[in-house]
Image (cartoon, rainbow, N blue to C red):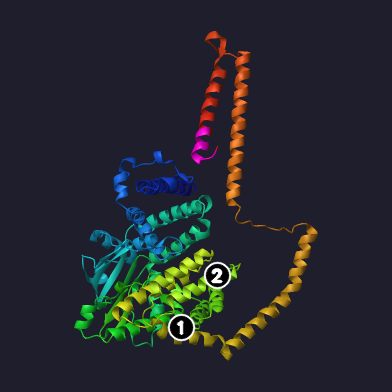
Amino acid sequence: MLFQRFKRIGQAVEHVQRLRVIVAVFLKYGYESMARRLPVPSPWHLPFKSQRKTQAQLASLTGPERLRHAFEELGPTFVKLGQLLSSRTHLLPREFTLELAKLHDLVPPIPFDQVKAVLHLELKRPLGEVFASIEDTPIGSASIAQVHRAVLITGEKCVVKVQRPDIEKNVRADLEIMAYLASLLENHVDGWRVHQPTAVVAEFAKSMEQELDFRAEAAHMERFAHQFATEPTIYVPAVVPGLVTKRVLTMEDIEGIKGSNFEALDALGLDRRQIATTITDLEMKQIFVHGFFHADPHPGNIQILPGNIICYLDFGMMGFLDHETRQTFAKFVLSIAQRNESATGAALLKLAHAELDPPRPGFEADVAEFMHRHFYRPAGEMVFGPLVDHLFNLTARYSLTLPADLSIMLKSLALMEDLVCRMDPGHDIIAQARPFMRQVMLQQIHPRRLLRQWLEFGGESAGLMRELPMEIKRVLAQVKEGRLRLHFHHQGLEGLMNTLERIVNRLAFALVLSSLIIASSVILHARVPPLLGHQVSAIGVVGYLIAGVMGFWLLIAMLRHGKM
């Protein structure tokens, strides 16, 4: 028990030190005003003051560039957060999201001795019993892990993904600090509550949990391979059984062509138009048929194999969509295709799980403008990236929040569309997606599905009727015994509560200050010993000095807050 307490104390000290570093880095890049609006250590008490950028240096960087540099300097967790925020155009202006999209996840590799130490610790046996050879130089080095080519003792070629030492500990510490800072933003900075920064950090923490556990990535690969087991146009690398742990992932080595290497594709005589069609077809099947999709299909994670076969890599981030969300999204897009603004707006509200409808006339007018801007144009001219940005801005304008997995899906579609349209300019993605969406809508009215829903409804209703008398009896018993309690949860009063708390604190401070002045005056008048020259009470003088310091402190606090 005592050891655990000392351990928690040590973790708290480390968190405080890391928090000071994080705040100092943001101060370095000119975020003093933000720091003063949050209850964090005062800027002049922080380390690295001498490293703070000069006005000339800050003037040479735009606001988005300063944020990107700060994230890069703070390390892997903030780089990953910046990459997530780059797809959240409803949180940040477009110039910020474009700049954060430049954040790279490439870092210098760790020494090979550390890689071998992690492998030995995780696999729990000598490496010579597992691998015939492992290349010292990694083929890829990122913030979470690095990848080495190897040959198994059986002679099969493979790649080994090895997690960096201590990365999990560092990431978890940063996530806890991010959650703390997000709560401060939500409760103390005007305008941030609607953006729900705590929910964004919670979503980010969930995705980081997946990336830090390679067993989850292996499970994703096996599920992805299973759902496309009968699909001849896709290949998923095989996971090597027995060589997967939380920090080590061993898989089949794939030698393909990067999806954006068009010259190499043409040199091998591969059909770029067919490849673009196949990639789109696979994306639609992932989203509308299976509801389990690759969340980061950028060109580096898509390899092209002979025969125009698509091979996906890096399954650390995956998205999930339930059947109802797929149906609603399909209805949303089909309503757009049918030029039905009212149905489109209703589908968007359902997607956002809106509890209160926004003003109908203004909302439907904005939905109509969104449709006219992006969908009333010739096939092949629609660009999905700006469409997604506009959709996020539209939902933010009416305080609507799309589910995290739906946002990830839209980002995935935007990445896919960018690659496909560069591979085959003029490719009509919407026309290719329309049959999949119609199929999802038809499934909603399929007799078998309707029968199953009615049976489920009947079973739930029967269960409710059986339980209802007992529930009523339980509530009445609580009323009779005086144990019934009603809980009220208020929203939107946090700013008022903070203001009232500040007023009460200042009043209490002022009362203590007044009492100290009165008491010191009485002591001076009574000449309470010990006495100084001219028969002045030393205790009274000290009381006056303390009162002066307290009064000056109160005045400074009021001036810093900007209100007297």
Task: Give percent across and percent down for residue 482.
Answer: 77, 57
Task: Give percent across and percent down for residue 55.
Answer: 32, 44
Residue position marked by numbered label 2 in the rendering: 363
Residue position marked by numbered label 1 in the rendering: 289
Task: Give percent across and percent down for residue 61.
Answer: 31, 52
Task: Tell me the SS state at disc 2.
Answer: helix
Q: Give the range drawn in magenta.
A: 555-563
Task: Tell me the SS state at disc 1.
Answer: helix
Residue 104 — which label? none
The disc labelled 2 sits on which kind of residue? Phe
Question: Residue drawn at (58%, 91%), measured in percent from left and top?
Answer: 447
Whether 214 is among the magenta residues is no
Q: Position of 469 compared to 214: left or right?
A: right
Residue at the top extreme? 534
Q: How many labels does the image show?
A: 2
Task: Give percent across and percent down for residue 404.
Answer: 48, 68
